[in-house]
Amino acid sequence: MQLVFAQGFDSERDKTLFGVCLFTAARIREACTLLSEDIYTPKGQVRPRLIIRKANTKGKLATRSIPVIEDLRQLLTNYYPIRGDIYLFPGRSNGHLAEDSAARILREACKQVGIMGVSTHSFRRTALTQMILTNSSSLWNETALL
């Protein structure tokens, strides 16, 4: 994963998008549909927790509030000047970046560094594995992944 972040992604947007997936265990749809106001305060500071709204979760069961760790905070701080006004990751039209577009960006980044077998869901699996290996049960519970 480090190689993809260091040499595969061409933009701060791409690093930030997949950083959100990696550091929060968010699904790609959840990351693509994040609203800027759910990440940043009106003064442009990164909030201590990011919000994944109920309507954008897989089961549409509950809104999730996930702590922002320092590595993610740095990515989000660097991304602030180019974020979207409404959606954190705006698409070409008035909406958000499409999940298929995100998957294409990832495929191209992996191809560039010679990595095969990575999908957008790989970031979620990696995050969950790290939570298990580091015994991060509090984060596991806070992200409502049980």
Image: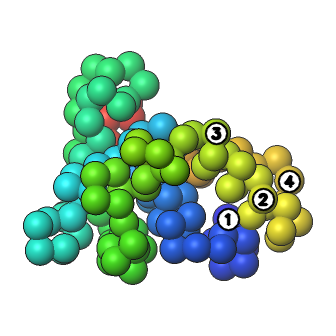
Closer to the eye: label 2 or 4: 2
Residue at 71 percent across and 49 percent down: it is 104
- Mark toward the start of the polypeptide (1 vs 4): 1
SS under mark 1: loop
Q: Are marks 2 and 4 in contact (CB under 8 Å)?
A: no
Identify the residue shown where x is 39% and y is 80%.
78
Q: Are marks 2 and 1 in contact (CB under 8 Å)?
A: no
- Name the element at disc 2: helix
Q: Is residue 33 visible?
A: yes
**What x and y, as percent, mark residue 53?**
26, 36
- Which of 105/84 is in front? 84
Q: Earlier in the sequence, mark 3 or mark 1?
A: 1
Give the amino acid at mark 3. Asp
Q: Nearer the viewer, mark 4 or mark 3?
A: 3
Which quadrant is the N terminus positioned in?
Answer: bottom right
Lower sequence index among marks 2 and 1: 1
